[in-house]
Image (cartoon, rainbow, N blue to C red):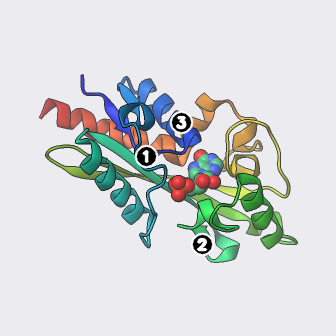
Amino acid sequence: MIKLLIGSNNPDKAQEMQDILQAENLATILLPSAVQGFPAEIAETGATLEENAYIKAVTIFAATNHTCVADDSGLEVDALGGAPGVYTGRYAGENASYAENRTKLLSALKGVPPEQRTARFRAVICYHDDLRIAFAEGVCEGRIAESERGEGGFGYDCIFIPDGFDQTFAEMGAVEKHRISHRGRALQCFATLFSAYQSA
Ligand code: IMP
């Protein structure tokens, strides 16, 4: 079976992608073990998640010649006109920590009532093999909490409450998060595409 190279140098995202794909019975390999010395960062110069996922997949495929999946993801907050969107990872500045990004978001939403704190996580997966480039997308609707809650996950997990739940992503188990998350949905959709490619 082909091992899918997971094209992310963010260990939190790579771990999630690996767990989700393994649950779909797909074999994976992580980028650092595949390519020693591969650049730690691929510049996200695209204007959209699709463009950034494409840039990552094409760069990784060119460097490795290995079937790969890359992901770009973002958080769109309605009260902020869809920000931080494509800038989610660097909302509080180029090398901002997860905590700095969350603090900036919570202060931008200070005083905004719960019903106006609607938001969504979006993930775009770009797949690249010898024959094709394909995309899959997943969206998870929810809202931004008033303060941080929970210890699990990473990034904005402790301030994102998915629709239908009272818990934040950080208060859920990983399996439950992956079942409904943007990344889980995008990769479940990708897994269906991939199995069609395998039997074509
Ligand atoms: P990128 O896809 O590498 O551009 O990163 C987007 C940023 O979005 C990450 O650095 C995280 O801060 C955030 N992010 C993406 N997915 C998740 C998630 O599942 N939970 C929490 N934060 C996330």
Residue 74 drawn above or below residue 32: below
CA neighbours of label 1 inside 10 A, class few (<14), some (14 to 19), many (20+): many
In the figure, 118 relative to 196: above or below? below
Q: Position of residue 60 (x, y in %)?
A: 33, 48
Work out how far the residue at label 1 is from the one at label 2, CA to CA, in angstroms.
20 Å
Residue tagged by mark 1?
A: 186
Q: Secondary structure at mark 3?
A: helix
What quarter of the picture does the N terminus occupy?
A: top left
> In what quadrant of the picture does the C terminus appear?
top left
Tell me which numbered mark, 2 or 3, is placed earlier along the sequence: 3
Q: Residue furthest front?
A: 37
Question: Which residue is drawn at the image coordinates 45% and 25% (left, top)?
Answer: 23
Left or right of 150: which side holds 33?
left
Whether disc 3's CB lies below 8 Å from ligand 1 is answered: yes
The three-letter amino acid code for the residue at tag 2 is: Gly
Q: Earlier in the sequence, mark 1 or mark 2?
A: 2
Q: With 64 as the anchor, is 176 left or right in this view?
A: right
> In this figure, which residue is indicated by the disc labeled 3?
16
Using the image as rendered, state which of residue 151 and residue 137 is in the foreground.
Answer: 151
Q: Are marks 2 and 3 in contact (CB under 8 Å)?
A: no
For residue 91, what is the image quadrant? bottom right
State whether residue 142 is above or below residue 7.
below
Image point 74% across, 65% down: which residue?
117
Residue 82's label in the rendered image is 2
User: Residue 58: where, in percent of width, then height?
Assistant: 29, 54
Q: CA distance from mark 2 to mark 3?
A: 24 Å
